[in-house]
Image (spheres, rainbow, N blue to C red):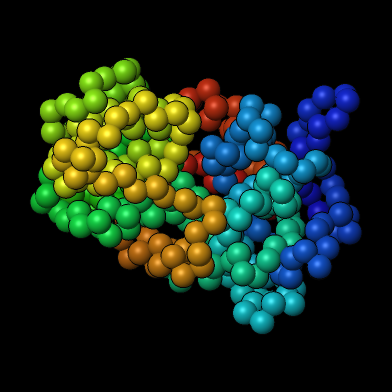
């Protein structure tokens, strides 16, 4: 038997509860070839939508949520993994169509897993989680399109969130001057401690704006979408690049082609869910090199497994900052 958060939805409604399950309830070996013991997980925005039933994330019921997990391999039928190996998992539809890591046991595909970098404990890896790994993918996208320190200010939207917090820490350590956009003026000191040189009110970007505006940003990391992304594009300098990785404000993009055809701006989409394994490993290797562990700890809180649903409620209502790790056992 093992403990897990189980999400159920039927004629009686939606329920999320911590219960004991038999290992026979896990996905069969024909569906996944590595049995793992997660030591830590986390609550990402998508996890929060699933745990609160606020968005159509779960596509197979019942479901154990938990996109992310880090811990130890217990049993493996995959040639790349042996019992005792330390792993990190992000994405691949886990917590949506496949039982996830907010549990004491999970059965996952070996091809989904990444070796836990020696620089990180499982707790630190989950403090990074999908949010921090996505932030690193955004930084790699900016660099891949030519952004270098000294090119100009880099805007990070959703700055107090998980992606934003890690992106600020990474970019500032790499030598970029970072401007953080946040709707929480009381968190300005927190953002500056992470490395932000300036903090602006997210309201400056959240409303409809002109299709082409004053050039401000050499690069952008955006986790919000909608008008925020449209305005960020309209303010990006000639030849600049915008990495888009989220939709917290909205799925729409009310923009024009003006930034692309008049300023040569690049809009780079960043997908963390289905990114190939080599890109994942490269991101984790860079995180081990470029993310300051002290700043990671500053942005991290911890709760036991039973409190994950309450964290999800606070995250959805905009009351969380940084990252929250979930201690499984």
Instruction: Kindly indicate the quadrant of the structure image that contains residue 258.
Output: top left
Nearest the viewer among 266 and 90 is 266
Camera sees residue 160: no
Number of marks in picture: 0
Nearest the viewer among 205 and 198 is 205
Q: On the rendered structure, is 321 left or right of 15?
A: left
Residue lying at 29% horizontally and 24% vertically, measured from the top left: 205
Residue lying at 46% horizontally and 46% vertically, measured from the top left: 131
Instruction: Kindly indicate the quadrant of the structure image that contains residue 184.
Output: top left
Residue at the limit of the structure toward the bottom, as seen here: 79
Residue lying at 81% horizontally and 35% vertically, measured from the top left: 8
x and y percentages locating residue 276 in the rendered image: 50, 64
Q: On the rendered structure, is 229 left or right of 55?
A: left
Does 216 appear above or below 72? above
x and y percentages locating residue 148 in the rendered image: 17, 56
x and y percentages locating residue 136 in the rendered image: 37, 54
x and y percentages locating residue 208 in the rendered image: 31, 18
Does 20 appear above or below 79? above
Does 254 appear above or below 144? above
Residue lying at 62% horizontally and 79% vertically, measured from the top left: 80
Camera sees residue 72: yes
Instruction: Kindly indicate the quadrant of the structure image that contains residue 304.
Output: top right
Q: On the rendered structure, is 292 left or right of 284?
A: left
- For the N terminus, the image quarter is bottom right
């Amino acid at each position: 038997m093992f403990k897990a958060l189980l999400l159920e939805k039927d004629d009686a409604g939606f329920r999320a509860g911590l219960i004991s399950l038999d290992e026979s309830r896990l996905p069969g070996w024909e569906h996944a070839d590595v049995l793992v013991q997660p030591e830590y997980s986390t609550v990402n925005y998508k996890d929060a939508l699933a745990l609160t039933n606020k968005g159509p994330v779960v596509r197979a019921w019942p479901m154990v949520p938990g996109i992310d997990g880090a811990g130890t391999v217990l049993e493996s039928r995959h040639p790349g993994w042996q019992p005792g190996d330390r792993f990190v998992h992000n994405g691949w539809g886990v917590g949506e169509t496949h039982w996830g890591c907010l549990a004491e046991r999970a059965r996952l595909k070996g091809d989904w897993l990444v070796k836990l970098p020696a620089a990180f404990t499982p707790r630190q890896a989950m403090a990074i989680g999908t949010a921090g790994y996505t932030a690193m993918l955004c930084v790699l996208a900016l660099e891949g399109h030519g952004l270098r320190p000294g090119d100009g200010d880099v805007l990070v939207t959703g700055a107090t969130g998980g992606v934003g917090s890690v992106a600020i820490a990474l970019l500032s350590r790499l030598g970029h001057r970072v401007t953080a956009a946040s709707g929480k003026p009381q968190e300005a000191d927190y953002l500056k401690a992470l490395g932000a040189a300036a903090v602006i009110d997210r309201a400056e970007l959240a409303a409809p704006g002109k299709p082409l505006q004053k050039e401000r940003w050499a690069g952008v990391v955006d986790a919000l979408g909608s008008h925020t992304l449209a305005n960020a594009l309209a303010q990006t300098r000639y030849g600049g690049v915008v990495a888009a990785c989220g939709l917290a404000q909205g799925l729409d993009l009310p923009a024009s082609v003006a930034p692309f055809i008049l300023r040569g701006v690049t809009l780079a989409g960043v997908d963390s869910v289905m990114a190939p394994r080599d890109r994942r490993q490269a991101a984790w290797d860079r995180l081990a090199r470029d993310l300051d562990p002290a700043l990671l700890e500053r942005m991290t809180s911890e709760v036991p497994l039973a409190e994950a649903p309450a964290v999800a409620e606070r995250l959805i209502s905009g009351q969380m900052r940084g990252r929250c790790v979930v201690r499984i056992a």
